[in-house]
Each structure stands twice: as structure tokens, then as C-alpha cells.
Amino acid sequence: MKNKGFALIEVLIGLGILAFGLLSLAGMQVIAIRGDLFGRHITQAAVIAQSKLEELTNLPYGDAKLNSGQYSEQVTESGTVYRVRYDVTDLGNTMKKLTATVVWEDRGDHTLSLSTIKAKNDG
């Protein structure tokens, strides 16, 4: 006599395999969400650093904000606090190196730095 259909043990094994597969997918989803969040944070940090450098390079060469030293401020975007530090270093009498460093915390401290050179315009 041929049995038609599935035995209980076959169904249980099939459900076990399905459950294992779904749990694996759920784990990958969590990793993808974390990666997406980190990507957003690093993009926002790059935008903040670039904005600070553009602000500084558009200032007149003799502006007080371009005196040699380190300066810092905080920026909050989408609930994340970014600490922004910018350094101004004189490179002779006609150039200054500007470095913007952004630090944020997301399961540990992360840092992004951008630099540029500002030249004195004698025109």
C-alpha cells in the first residue's frame, strides 16, 4: 500500500529547515541595518567636515577664525552628536593648512578628517 502525503517527521524536518533559514535571514537583516546606519553617519560626518572647510576657505585670509590653533564645536544631526574640531596651521606667510575632524559615537568612537590648503590672495 502506497502512502500519499507527508509523515509527521518529514513535516517537522521541513519546518526546522525553514526556521533555520528564516533566522539566518533575520540575522543578515540586522547586519544590513547596522551597515546602513554607519553609512549614513559617515556621509553626514563628511558633509559636516566639508561644510566647515568651505566656510573657512571662504573667509578672508586675515580673519580671526583663521588664526593658528585648534577650535571645536558640536553639531547634532538626526539625534547624533558630532564633535567637530578644526585645526589651522600656518605654512609660511602665504598658506594655511585647514583640517576638519569630525568624531561621533556609534558602538565606539569613529573619526573622519578632511584637509585643504588656503592660499593668501594678494589681488
Image (tube, rainbow, N blue to C red):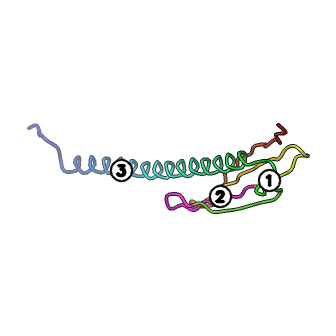
Count residues near mark 1 (Cα–Cα under 10 Å), then give few for <14, some for 14-19, many for 20+.
many
What residue do we see at 75% from left, 43% from top?
Answer: 116
Hey, what amino acid is under mark 2?
A: Val
- Picture coordinates of residue 70 (x, y %)? 78, 60
The answer to which of marks 1 and 2 sits earlier in the sequence is 1
Q: Provide the secondary structure element on which disc 2 rests.
A: strand
Q: Is residue 83 magenta?
A: yes
Residue 86 x %, y %: 73, 55
Quadrant location of the N terminus in the rendered image: top left
Magenta stretch in the rendered image: 76-86
Instruction: Report the front residue among 97 and 61.
Output: 61
Which residue is label 3 attached to?
Answer: 20
Position in image of residue 91 (x %, y %) = 88, 46
- Amino acid residing under circle 1: Val
Rounded to the nearest angstrom, the CA distance separating label 2 from label 3 is 39 Å
Q: Read off the residue under disc 1.
A: 88
